[in-house]
Amino acid sequence: MSGSWTVAGAVFGALGVALGAFGAHGLRARLDPALLAVFETGVRYHMYHALALVAVGLADARWPGAGLGAAGWLMAIGIVVFSGSLYLLALTGARWLGAIAPIGGTALIAGWLWFAVRLWQAR
């Protein structure tokens, strides 16, 4: 699965760059600065975790069978739920979407913790 996480990270990274450009060039004049900041937070965490998925893939190639796939799934789900809810909040102004972001944030944290524990055990 290591190659899959590396590819997923690259695809998420490309999408993050595209969304960042959309925010910087397409939304700057259209969104309230506070909502633009929300969108930019989504992009920032999206990109951090796209790179983290590449790291999961590389680590999985180095330590096959270490059980790192769960970290990849948690991070991918976290990107979609955390960043996705922030993107939608910024674009729609629907404040209730802010209540969904912590679910994605929890998945991101769990992904990092799973990654750390499994790397520790694999060494």
Image (cartoon, rainbow, N blue to C red):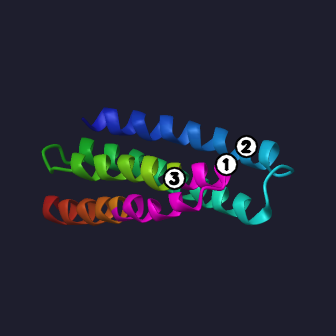
First in sequence: mark 1 or mark 2? 2
**Type of amino acid at the residue the image marks with label 2:** Ala
The residue that disc 2 covers is 21
The segment highlighted magenta reads: 85-106
Q: Amino acid at mark 1?
A: Leu
Query: Residue at the spot x=64%, y=61% of the render?
Result: 38
The mark that comes first in sequence, 3 or 2, is 2
Which residue was labeled with disc 1? Answer: 91
Say which quadrant the C terminus sits in: bottom left
Q: Is residue 75 above or below residue 34?
A: above
What is the x, y in percent for residue 44? 59, 57
**Within 10 Å of the Cα at label 2, are there few (<14), some (14-19), or many (20+) other Cα atoms?**
few
Callout 3–callout 1 Cβ contact below 8 Å:
no
| Residue lying farthest to the right in this orientation | 29
> Of helix, strand and loop, which one carries label 3?
helix
**Looking at the magenta stretch, what is its main secondary structure?**
helix
Q: Residue 112, located in which quarter of the rendered image?
A: bottom left
